[in-house]
Image (tube, coloured by chain):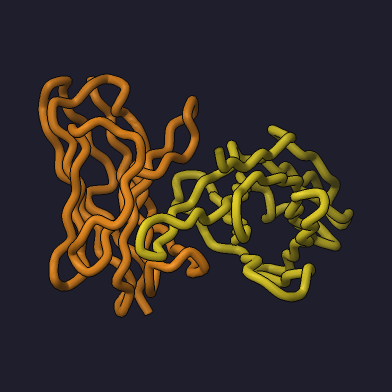
Amino acid sequence: AQSVAQPEDQVNVAEGNPLTVKCTYSVSGNPYLFWYVQYPNRGLQFLLKYITGDNLVKGSYGFEAEFNKSQTSFHLKKPSALVSDSALYFCAVSVSGSGNTGKLIFGQGTTLQVKP
Amino acid sequence: KAGVTQTPRYLIKTRGQQVTLSCSPISGHRSVSWYQQTPGQGLQFLFEYFSETQRNKGNFPGRFSGRQFSNSRSEMNVSTLELGDSALYLCASRRDSGPTYEQYFGPGTRLTVT
């Protein structure tokens, strides 16, 4: 079965420090990986994706993610955290369906708390 | 470019009733997907529509259905509501339905079943 795991329910980091939100995946075939962020009472916002090519992917708001095929991981990172980064983060994998379609399978989410 | 819009934003229904939720995708996007978000089950895929055809379906009972119109707007319907259907229902659109295309989400409809 294809799945995504986010091993940490919550990550706490001080403002200005680097942050990492972890994600591992299990898929058959090529992994198409995504990160989304959700603020309270809002929908999900797309941050970045890995399709192929360079293992380091840069996205919105200074976030980046590193794809590691051997460890089946796709960790989200940011060099310097902001209080405004505090939110719920979801890792997702796009699973191919019939007719070259794709549906997203999400991890359970990680709450990022950035303290001033 | 306007984002994905969902109406209504909040809804309170009674067990046994039915409900219809609406989603307008980003202009030019032909694929619309629906997801259910609950504290216990997280984000779960309901179904996807592309060019008015259902392309993918998640593991939900037949009480959950949807459709897409020629202008790509989509509706989902839940019949015979149960307490467990209380959730945030998210609609997402993308330019095409291939697995590499990112999805853009609306703000969601918060459904409460009493």
* Front in this rendered view, residue B33 or A100: A100
Residue A79, horizontal then vertical, whole percent: 85, 62
Quadrant of the rendering where the C terminus of chain B is positioned: top left
* Front in this rendered view, residue A45 or B73: B73
Image vertical order of residue A112 relative to residue A15, above or below: above
Residue A62, horizontal then vertical, whole percent: 73, 69
* Front in this rendered view, residue B24 or A93: A93
Residue A116, horizontal then vertical, whole percent: 81, 48
Image vertical order of residue A27 relative to residue A16, above or below: above
Can residue A33 be seen here? no
Image vertical order of residue A41 relative to residue B60, above or below: below
Tell me which corner region of the image, top left, top right, bottom left or bottom right, holds residue A102: bottom left
Residue ID at (57%, 42%):
A2
A65 displayed left or right of B90: right
Chain represented in yellow: A
Residue ID at (35%, 63%):
A99
Quadrant of the rendering where the N terminus of chain B is positioned: bottom left
User: Residue farthest to the left?
Assistant: B17
Can residue B102 be seen here? yes
Tell me which corner region of the image, top left, top right, bottom left or bottom right, holds residue B109: top left
B2 displayed left or right of A35: left
Chain represented in orange: B
